Amino acid sequence: MNRRAALRWLAAATTAVALTGLAGCGIPMDSQPRDVAEPDQPFAIQGPDAAAESGSSMSDPVVYFLTPRPNEHLVAAHRPVGYNADDLMNALLGKLTADEMRLNWRSAIPANVTFVGTSLVGDGTILVKLAAPKDAASFLQGEDGVRVAAQIVYTILGVPGAKAVQVELNGELQKLLDEDGNVLNRPAVESDYLSYADPNN
């Protein structure tokens, strides 16, 4: 065998060994290129959104509760609900988790307040409809009324496209208070409650 023939034989043998090794690793061998369907992919190939699609709690929408006094402020709580106003309000009026209760988080919204629904009433303005017994209908007034408004506004403005919030109680449109207790003659926005903003967000 001359030198050129020997080199050809060595190259062919090396290729055969390599192909055998690849097949042994579970990589299918084809005679020509083809698209590889996900179940046939020999390695786990994930796009950049794979982590977000895994159901991570940090990607869930948030509702806002209150930290203990005296350094009281809003605190974000993740909830596995949809990014829509109805789901967020139902979550806000729902129960705190055991961990949140251990941290002494609370809500200024009374337990006897019920959620009726939401509607879009203007360019990005969401109307939140609530109901409460007559003897509890003053919960939107005073210092606690400011806290309630801050919770609702920050929670609802987490809805994509939401810009402002109004509240209806027992069928009547309410004028919310800003952080200084001033009556708002317009829909409320986040900047009306900056002193309550979550410092971690």
Image: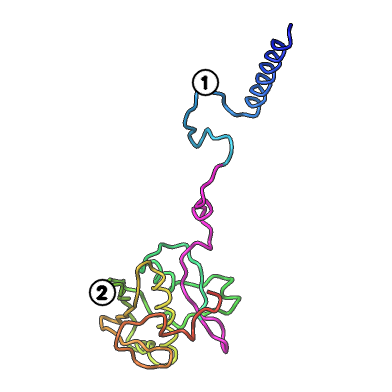
Marker disc for residue 31: 1
Task: Inspect the image, locate mark 2, and give the three-letter code of the amino acid beneath it.
Answer: Gly
Residue assigned mark 2: 122
Furthest residue in direction top, as rendered: 1
Q: Secondary structure at mark 1?
A: loop
- Residue 164: which disc? none
Question: Camera-side residue: 140 or 22?
Answer: 22
Instruction: Give the quadrant of residue 41.
Output: top right
Q: Magenta-highlighted stretch: main secondary structure?
A: loop
Q: Is residue 192 left or right of residue 104?
A: left
Position above or below: 40 against 14: below
- The picture places residue 2, in percent across and down from the top left corner, at 73, 8
In the image, residue 61 lies in the stretch drawn in magenta: yes
Q: Is residue 10 above or below residue 54?
A: above
| Kind of element beneath mark 2 | loop
User: How far is mark 1 from mark 2, CA to CA?
Assistant: 62 Å
Q: Is residue 40 above or below residue 7?
A: below
Give the magenta part as a residue range.
Answer: 45-73
User: Which residue extends farthest front?
Assistant: 3
Q: Identify the residue at horizontal 64%, vertical 27% (top origin).
A: 22
Left or right: 19 in relation to 145: right
Few, some or many C-alpha atoms within 10 Å of disc 1 (few <14, some 14-19, many ≥20)? few
The residue shown at (69%, 20%) is 14
